[in-house]
Image (cartoon, helix red, strand yellow):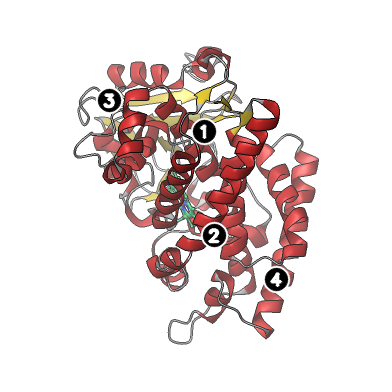
Amino acid sequence: MTALPQPFDESFRAMPHAVFSKLRDEAAVHRVALPDGAEVWLATRDEDVRAGLADTRLSVNKAHSTGGYQGFSLPPALDANLLNLDHDDHIRLRRLVAQGFTPRRAETMRAGIQTVADRLADGLAQRLDSDGVADLVSEFAGPLPLTVVCDLFDVPEADRQPFASWVRTMLALESPQQVGEAISKMHDFLRRLVAERRTAPGDDLLSALIAARDEDDRLSEDELCSLAFLVLGAGIENVQHLLSAGFLALLRHPRQLAAVRGDSSLLPDTVEEMMRYAHPNLTAIRRFPTEPVEYGGVRIPAGDTVLFVLASANRDPERYEEPDRFDIRRRDNMHLAFGQGMHYCLGAPLARMEIGLALEALFSRFPVLRLAVEPDELRWQTSFRSHALCELPLTR
Ligand code: HEM
C-alpha cells in the first residue's frame, strides 16, 4: 500500500496558506495522514466546504466514526455539547441555548466591552511608556475576550484570577496532566456556579440558560456545564487569535490602516476581511459521513473523517479575486470563518462586536503603532487545526 501524503510538516508550519493553496490547485479533495498517522480527507475548495458543512449526511458525532481521527476528547460530562451532536439532539439543544444567546444580549454588553477595551488600551500605553515595547496578545487580545466571557457568566470578582489561570492552562495544551487538572477544576467551578444561579438567578447567560424552557424540556446540569465549557473555549481563544493576526494584517498594510482609522464607516468591512484573511481555525471540526458521499468527484466512505478546510475555502480564487491580498474594501466577502449551516457560530454577533470595539479602542488611544520586530521573527503556534500568533510585540 502506498503511504499517504503528510502535508502538515515543517514547511506547512512555516507557511500553511501556501500549502493549502497548492493542495487546492491540485485537487478538491485529498486523502492525507495527520502528523500522528491518523487518516483524513481534506476538502479544500469553497464550493465543497460550503456544501459539506450544511450536508446532513455528515455527522459531528464520534459514534459515526469507524476509527480515523476523532478530535479532542473531554470527560463525558463535558462532551454533550453542540459541536458533538446532530439533527434532533442538536436542534433541541440549540433551540434552548438560542434563548440565552440572543443578539440583544450581545448588544447589552456593548458598553461593558468598550470600557474593558479602553482600560486594556490604557494598560498597553503604560507598558509602551515604561518599556518601549508591549505585547498585544498578552496585554490586550487575550484579556479582552477572557473578561467578556467572565462578564457573560458574571463570574464573581474573587474567582476571576483562578478562572483565568485554568483557561490559560487549558488553552496552552502543554502538559496533558496540567490540562486534565485545569479541566477538572473548571468543571467543579462551573457546577458550583450553576448551583448558585439556580437558587439566586441573575442577568447573566448562565441564569438565562437555566431558565430556558421548550415546553417541558430544559437543559440538564451536564448540558449546562458542557455548553459553558464550549463557550469558554470558542469564545476566548478564537477572538484572541483573530484579533492578534487580524491586527498584524492591518499593521502590514499601513495605507488600509490609515484609511479605516480615518473613516469609521470602513470598520465593519475591515472586521470581515480580518475574519476571512486571518481567522485562526484552519479547519472546521471533524465530520463523519453516515453514508458514502461524493465531494469534488471523490467518493468518501461512511465512517471516515473529513476535514473541511475553512482557511483554504476563504482563499479560493474561484470565489475571491486575488484571494491572498488583504483588502478591507473587498466586495461580496461571504467568508466561512464562522462556519456554515446548522453549526454556524452562535457567538458571531458578539465576536464581531468585540473585534470592532477593540479596533476602535486601539485607534483612538494610539495615533501610531508599529511592529517591534521583523515579520519573519514572529512566532506562531500552528497545527492542522489552527494558526495562532504567540506574541505581537508593538512599539510606537
Ligand atoms: C472570531 C471569533 C470566532 C470564530 C472565528 C468562531 C468560529 C466558529 C466556527 C468555525 C464554528 C463552527 C464549527 C464547525 O462547524 O465545525 C463555531 C461554532 C460555535 N461558536 Fe464560534 N467562533 C468565534 C467566536 C465565538 C464566541 C465569542 C462564542 C461565544 C461566546 C462562540 C461560540 C460558538 C458556539 C457555541 C458554537 C457551536 C454552535 C453549534 O454547534 O451549533 N464562538 N465558531
Nearest to N terminus: mark 4 or mark 2: 2
The amino acid sitting under disc 4 is Leu
Residue at 69% over, 37% down: 173
- In terms of secondary structure, where does tag 3 sit? loop
How far apart are the alpha carbons under marks 2 and 3? 34 Å
Q: Can residue 140 be seen in this view?
A: yes
Looking at mark 4, is its residue's CB closer than 8 Å to ligand 1? no
How far apart are the alpha carbons under marks 1 and 3? 19 Å
How far apart are the alpha carbons under marks 4 and 2? 18 Å
Image x and y of residue 278, in percent:
42, 32
Q: Residues within 10 Å of mark 4 (few under 14, many from 20)?
A: some
How far apart are the alpha carbons under marks 3 and 4? 45 Å
Q: Residue at label 3? A: 323
Nearest to N terminus: mark 2 or mark 3: 2
The amino acid sitting under disc 2 is Asn
232 horizontally vs 287: left or right: right
Q: Residue at label 2? A: 81
Residue 326 lies in what quarter of the image? top left
Q: Residue at label 4? A: 193
Image x and y of residue 352, in percent:
40, 50
